[in-house]
Image (cartoon, rainbow, N blue to C red):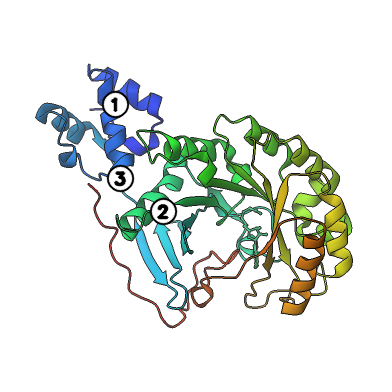
């Protein structure tokens, strides 16, 4: 007997091959895809528009697999929820659901750990365990969606969790196929943002991808000297010049902008001269800037700037007509803030017990 096929590990065309091998009509694969992704089915008996015989074949030969939600923690102050998923090999990854006035944004992880070791980032301290597979990325959305329920649709997806998405580009693109497909989750690529520390060749590759998702770039410094200090692994390979050239060459669809993220580190990159240099670096780029005041973690080598320093930084950019937003840190009490997506053994107060991922259907 041949091995059981985990259907979520298949691409749409591999699933079509699987269906064809059973002698099924072409539309059968689409039906199965829609059940799995659009409707979140986790069992074949939920697939009510498939014949009994076909379902029996699926029961014998395949499994769907469902996201294993190991834990959910909710920040009582701002409603941010952090999901901890356990993967088949036991590895743990996190996703964070961030409510805002008119959005519900899910922040997704793409790697277990990261190779880049940016000095301000907690994930960087753990090294890379492995890349996530496309279905492990999509399962974060399916698990969070099931947990949030139909009354709270997730409106935006950002690849800003653990890991460097462009270091795992093939799986990220395959995940985006499923997230945007009509049989899948049906997201507009405008609602999806991929954030990178600056992998220059992969920025061009993402630009060539058929789904025109938004690009965010974690700039975080305005000179190579400072950038080498705070994110040396990536900047020594692709210095600022090369990074900004890749951004200028990025094929932006009309009316869209690149987001530059700028983690503000006290006394390191938050001075008025940094803001002025940032203005000249970004000259002529269709962009906006998100200033993220550093979120401290235990024994971190950096500090959060004062509110005054942040306000002055923003004012300098605003005077140069660069739209600049200050990112309030959310989910602080659950260590869900940017770069803090890592399981902690000691749990802060205010946690709720983990509910099971609700069954879809
Ligand atoms: N590797 C990708 C995506 C993950 S990091 C990237 O670098 O863009 C997502 C964002 O969180 C980046 O902008 C990063 O600079 C920021 N970040 C990481 N650690 C942080 C911290 N402790 N405080 C504030 N922002 C942080």
Label drawn at residue 41: none
Residue 350 visible in the displayed image: yes
Q: Where does the image place residue 68, in percent across and percent down from the top left?
A: 34, 56
Residue beneath disc 2: 154
Relative to 327, say whether 141 is above or below: above
Residue beneath disc 3: 65
Spot the residue most to the left: 52
**Could you tell me which residue is drawn at 58 percent across and 39 percent down?**
169
Q: Quadrant of residue 261?
A: bottom right
- The nearer-to-camera label among 3 and 1 is 1
Closer to the chain start, of discs 1 and 2, is 1
Q: CA distance from mark 3 to mark 1?
A: 17 Å
**Could you tell me which residue is drawn at 31 percent across and 55 percent down?**
146
Q: Where does the image place residue 216, in percent across and percent down from the top left?
A: 65, 49
Relative to 145, say whether 307 is above or below: below
* Residue 106 appears left or right of 329: left
Please report contact status of discs 3 and 1: CB closer than 8 Å, yes or no.
no
Q: Nearer the viewer, residue 99 or 62?
A: 99
Q: Nearer the viewer, residue 312 or 354?
A: 312
* Residue 208 appears left or right of 228: left
Q: Where does the image place residue 310, in percent across and percent down from the top left?
A: 74, 72
Residue 222 visible in the displayed image: no
Q: CA distance from mark 2 to mark 3?
A: 21 Å
Secondary structure of residue under mark 3: loop
Secondary structure of residue under mark 2: loop
- Dot 1 surroundings within 10 Å: few (below 14), some, or many (20 or more)? many
Question: Quick check: which quadrant has ligand 1?
Answer: bottom right
Residue beneath disc 1: 29
Q: Quadrant of residue 86?
A: bottom left
Relative to 126, say whether 53 is above or below: above
Spot the residue most to the bottom: 349
């Amino acid at each position: 007997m041949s091995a059981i096929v985990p259907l979520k590990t298949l691409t749409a065309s591999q699933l079509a091959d699987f269906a064809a091998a059973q002698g099924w009509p072409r539309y059968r694969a689409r039906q199965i895809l829609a059940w799995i992704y659009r409707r979140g089915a986790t069992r074949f008996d939920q697939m009510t528009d498939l014949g009994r015989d076909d379902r029996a074949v699926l029961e014998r030969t395949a499994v769907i697999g469902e996201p294993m939600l190991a834990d959910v923690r909710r920040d009582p102050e701002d409603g941010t929820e952090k999901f901890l998923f356990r993967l088949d090999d036991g590895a743990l990854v996190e996703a964070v659901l961030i409510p805002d006035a008119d959005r519900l944004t899910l922040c997704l992880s793409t790697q277990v750990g990261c190779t880049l070791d940016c000095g301000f980032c907690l994930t960087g301290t753990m090294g890379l365990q492995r890349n996530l597979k496309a279905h492990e990325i999509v399962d974060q959305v399916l698990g969070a969606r099931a947990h949030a329920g139909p009354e709270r649709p997730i409106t935006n997806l950002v690849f800003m969790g653990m890991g460097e998405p462009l270091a795992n580009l093939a799986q990220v693109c395959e995940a985006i196929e499923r997230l945007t497909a009509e049989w899948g989750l049906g997201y507009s690529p405008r609602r999806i943002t991929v954030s990178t520390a600056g992998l220059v060749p992969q920025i061009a590759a993402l630009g060539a991808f058929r789904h025109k998702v938004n690009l965010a770039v974690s700039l975080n410094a305005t000179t190579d000297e400072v950038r080498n200090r705070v994110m040396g692994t990536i900047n020594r390979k692709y210095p600022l010049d090369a990074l900004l050239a890749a951004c200028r060459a990025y094929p932006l669809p009309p009316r869209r902008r690149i987001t530059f993220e700028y983690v503000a580190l006290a006394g390191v990159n938050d001075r008025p001269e940094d803001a002025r240099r940032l203005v000249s670096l970004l000259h002529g780029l269709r962009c906006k800037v998100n200033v993220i005041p550093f979120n401290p973690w235990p024994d971190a080598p950096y500090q959060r700037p004062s509110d005054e320093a942040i306000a002055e930084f923003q004012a300098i950019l605003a005077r140069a007509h660069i739209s600049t937003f200050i990112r309030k840190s959310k989910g602080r009490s659950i260590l869900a803030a940017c770069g803090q997506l890592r399981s902690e053994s000691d749990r802060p107060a205010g946690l709720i017990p983990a509910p099971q991922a609700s069954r879809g259907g």
